[in-house]
Amino acid sequence: MAAASDKARFYLEQQVPELREWERREIFSKEEISAIASKRSDFEHILNARGSTPSDYARYAEYEMNLDSLRRKRVKRKGVKTTAYTGQKHIFSILDRSTRKFHGDLGLWMQYLEYARSQKANKKLNKLLAEVLRMHPTKAEVWIYAARYAVDVQADVPAARNYMQRGLRFCSKSRAMYLEYARLEMVYVAKINARRRILGIEPGKNDSVEAVDAGADGEQEEDRDADMIALPTFTGEDLAGGDEDEDGESKITNVGGTDPALTPAMTGAIPLAIFDAAMKQFASPPDLAEQFFNTFAIFSQLSFLDRILQHVVGKMTEAAPSSPSTLSCSCRMPLIGLAVDDPAFPIALGKVLKAIRSSLEKTSDRPTLARKLSGWLLPISTQETLAPELKKVISVTLKQLKKEDNDQSASS
């Protein structure tokens, strides 16, 4: 017990200059300083005694984060220009101690990562990512976090791809890894397309999927096929600096001539390769394919979306033609990317309603299909810009689907 008290006293003594400065600059009152010291003493004695838990460290770190937030607000309000001490170093110290003692607790690592990210401590965060990935290589959420950080903060798509490809070696059974990788590639293409529109770069007259399929010579075709086949193996060199030809050019950016819009990376080849790899890995489950469909369908602004969705539905139809997931995605296809006030919406809605009636006859699970379609149609029916007559038609269909669900549930 004495050893625990000595350790606690050691850490508390290091905090004395900080508390004195806060009092001298009148950031906190004398009573508040005493309360802070008392609270820290309680935490330090708990942490340094036997039986401390990860939640003890997490609570201590959370307390210090809240305290530092209050300190920042008071410094700003009182006009204190500079302070020798901030809470960041102390919080990093607590989190560092926590992950050293409980290196197997992923929650502490994620708290550490989130705090470093909130403080924009990018060098610290990169070191933490390397360490946590070394400690927890089989945790898919860590690889996903690293990839998202690379894209969202560092704008480094090759690094994000490298994280995902490496992660899939360790987490080959993780559906979330495949889904996130596909989403990441769709986000990348969407951002590039948006940037081209802002810069006024108009697509070429042959800027289409057909042009990509037929516009390259035999050697380029062979290179592109090699890339598309290599992607699902997720080797570390595939899209992260290792895809270079003899001239040192990137294969992906070199395919399709001088227009970057014609490369496989910009026409959906990579998301399709990821989808096909996932279907092969998990034996084509319709529920996973539906998740891919939902992930892709969000990117309605991409010109190649229809081709990707048709490919997904085609695979689903081959594997499980009567599955509610397959039929639900097939029914939704005509309306993907259409606004309710689009002139083409009424005709597409007619196709959807016809497909719904046909699908209910084909499916092996009518209640599930009815619930899926109801959940999809309901938000559409509540949109303010939807024409009243179309709203009425959708309302009737929703009632029929609800009745279908209730009748089947009652009979079972």
Image (cartoon, helix red, strand yellow):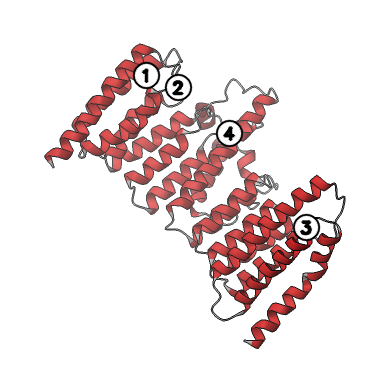
Check disc 3 and report the residue beneath it.
Answer: 28
- Considering only order in the chain, which callout, 3 or 1, is on the residue closer to the N terminus? 3
Q: In this view, does 123 lie to the left or right of 225?
A: right
The CA span between labels 4 and 1 is 25 Å
Task: Count every numbered label the image shows and give the total.
Answer: 4
Label 2 sits on what residue type? Leu
In the picture, the quarter occupied by the C terminus is top left
Under circle 4, the secondary element is helix
Checking the image for residue 348, the label placed there is 1
Residue 90 horizontal/vertical position (percent): 73, 65
- Considering only order in the chain, which callout, 4 or 3, is on the residue closer to the N terminus? 3
Q: Is residue 351 left or right of residue 162?
A: left
Q: Are marks 2 and 1 in contact (CB under 8 Å)?
A: yes
> Which residue is at the far bottom?
2
Residue 322 horizontal/vertical position (percent): 24, 38
The CA span between labels 3 and 4 is 49 Å
Where is residue 401, by image quadrant? top left
- Considering only order in the chain, which callout, 1 or 2, is on the residue closer to the N terminus? 2
Label 1 sits on what residue type? Ala
Label 4 sits on what residue type? Ala
Which is closer to the viewer, label 2 or label 3? 3
Residue visible at 42% across and 37% down? 294
